[in-house]
Amino acid sequence: MISIPRLPAVATCLTLALTLAVGHAPQATAAPVSTVERVTLPGTGTITIAGRGYGHGRGMSQYGARAAASQGVGYQQILDFYYPGTTSVAQADEPIRVLISADSDNDVRILAVPGMTASDSVNRNTPIGFPGQTVTQWRITRSGSGLYLDGLVGGSWKRWSQGASPGFLSIAAPSGFIRLIGPTGTQKDYRGTVRAVIDGASPRIRTVNEVRMDDYLRSVVPAESPSSWPADALRAQSVAARTYASFERAQAPGAAWHSCDTTQCQVYAGHKSFTSAGVQTALHEAATTDAAITSTANQVRHSGGRPAFTQFSASNGGWTAAGSQPYLVARADPWDGTGNPVHRWSVKLTAAQLRSAFPSVGTVRSITVQSRTGNGEWGGRVERVVVAGSTGSTTVTGSAFRSALGLRSDWWKLTASSRIDSDFTADGRPDLLAQIPGGGLRAYEGNGTGGFLRQTTVGSGWSGMRLVIRAGDLTGSGNPDVLAVSAQGTLYRYPSDGAGRFGPRSVVGPGWSSMSTILAPGDVDRDGDADLLAIDTSGSMWLYPGNGTGGFGARRFVGPGWSSMTAVLGAGDWNGDGTADLLARSQTGDLLLYRGNGTGGFSPVRIGNGWSGMRLLLPVDDWDGDGVPDLLASDSTGRMYLYPWSGSSFQARRQVGTGWSSIERIF
């Protein structure tokens, strides 16, 4: 399991009441979504990846449990929601055997105390020691197929074993605590006993702590959920952790170990940690989590008469992920986004990091998401992705991509890139926004194959804006923003909420009255942030580098002479070189592609003529599902056409709508 990251404290006071669907049938898992989300990379520079959640997302969200408990939801209801169909059952507090992963030097050393005993598969609780001599450490080593115990007496090791112990050799102390000395000399106290077990060929042995289940949980629960969290969140964590460990134990009751002490299983650090000199450095138990374990003593969740596979992770991003069991369902989570610092995240990656993660493909040239789960924003978690480079390509799962790059989850999206982002509904398909007479704003959802699904009114009052554009993702949220200049010259940013509407606007800055055109082609300067270009009334173009937080850095001069163009539009990457480009229409009706050079400059090439008759023009992200951007255009009669772009030229246009003559602008 992934433990909760230690992040700055977040507020526990919740202002939004959420309705829990406990007792209702789980939502049906959506079918996987095929997609062609291709982002071409320049080979240098930086890209931004936005994501949702932390961990695999299956079962309980720990931050979701925290938010639910803060609202007064009991731990049983929390567990009912995250593991629907499981039942609460009491079990005996039996021991569990946990692999101590860090002790891997093929001997097990224990700090000696009086009264210790040894056990193996033949003899139980045999007193160990040398009469009249002081033992300071005990050591278990392997020879052939047997284990032997030595005591450290006067600085020398002395053999205690009279014969080899097959399988395992265990040490116990009267206090119930054993201090294990690690390979570097640091020490840890463990409850229960510590044993050496044979693992593979000689001299390989592994170290295992056998401990009663609820004593084991005393270290696990505070490692997985902060002990300051609400009591019912800690109770839910206690039951989930106890059940998860019981499930592991039930898979192979006689195994040398049932679980491990890392995030691959459940985080377990023992009772206390010490320096090599015996100075305590940490206590791994807490009073609040002890109380949660005690109040839920012996409680587990069952399915089909056996312990359930109660997976959990820090955050599911708003949707639980479907798992291997019928109770691990995909469903919207009403709690995960509340007070959760890892519900949304973004990270910048360099070309060098991509090459290091996928060395077999050489310099990474493109990343193409081909399939998603179908649940949640952007079409859900990534299932399949193709990484192509200078020497080849590889197809990996979303989980493998996550692991290779150290991402927080497999629910991610390349954003703020050279790819235009017009997916305002966060369904994985590009959309179009249109301003209608009277200042109303409509959203037209794309169907991913070249047409439209539906239209929805999403706002009003836009007639007061002199300039309005789709701006891409300016903040690393994974969703596009809109920029608008008011009649007074103030530039505003409207963040998309991922459902086709917008959150509260923010002021970017005043003084934009001198600009006749603004456009957002994507990441112009290869720093991983979406940028803004503006043309002033004299025809000079300026680059405003995005800062990744919704604002812009000091502007830079791009070039003069743009007043001769009747339209200049941000286009994304149209020639496949990984750098954002522009489209411009001349006074004679020629359509020009201005290819970005990655430093803020552009070079033109003519890609068409006869465009004077088009009243509305809009470069869009891959509108027809072939992996390259396209162009939408409406003529004076109100007919809307799709001009599919092949990467080097336009294919035959297709009419995709009528009635657009009343539309004032599209973006």
Image: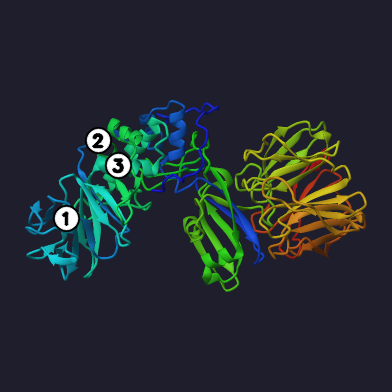
Q: Where is residue 267 in the image (x, y as percent from the top left)?
A: 35, 48
Q: Are marks 2 and 3 in contact (CB under 8 Å)?
A: no
Name the N-terminal-most of marks 1 and 3: 1
Q: What residue type is labelled 1?
A: Ser
Q: Are marks 1 and 3 in contact (CB under 8 Å)?
A: no
Q: Is mark 2 on a helix, strand or loop?
A: loop
Q: Is mark 3 on a helix, strand or loop?
A: helix
Mark 1 packing: few (<14 Cα in 10 Å), some, or many (20+)? many
Q: Can residue 660 be seen in this view?
A: no
* Residue position for label 3: 217
Name the N-terminal-most of marks 2 and 1: 1
Q: Is residue 383 above or below residue 307?
A: below
Say how many tags the image has: 3
* Residue position for label 2: 298
Q: Is residue 293 visible?
A: yes
Name the N-terminal-most of marks 2 and 3: 3
* Residue position for label 1: 170
Q: Give the residue furthest to the bottom.
A: 391
Q: Residue at x 33, y 37 (%)?
A: 238
Q: How far apart are marks 2 and 1 (CA)?
A: 26 Å
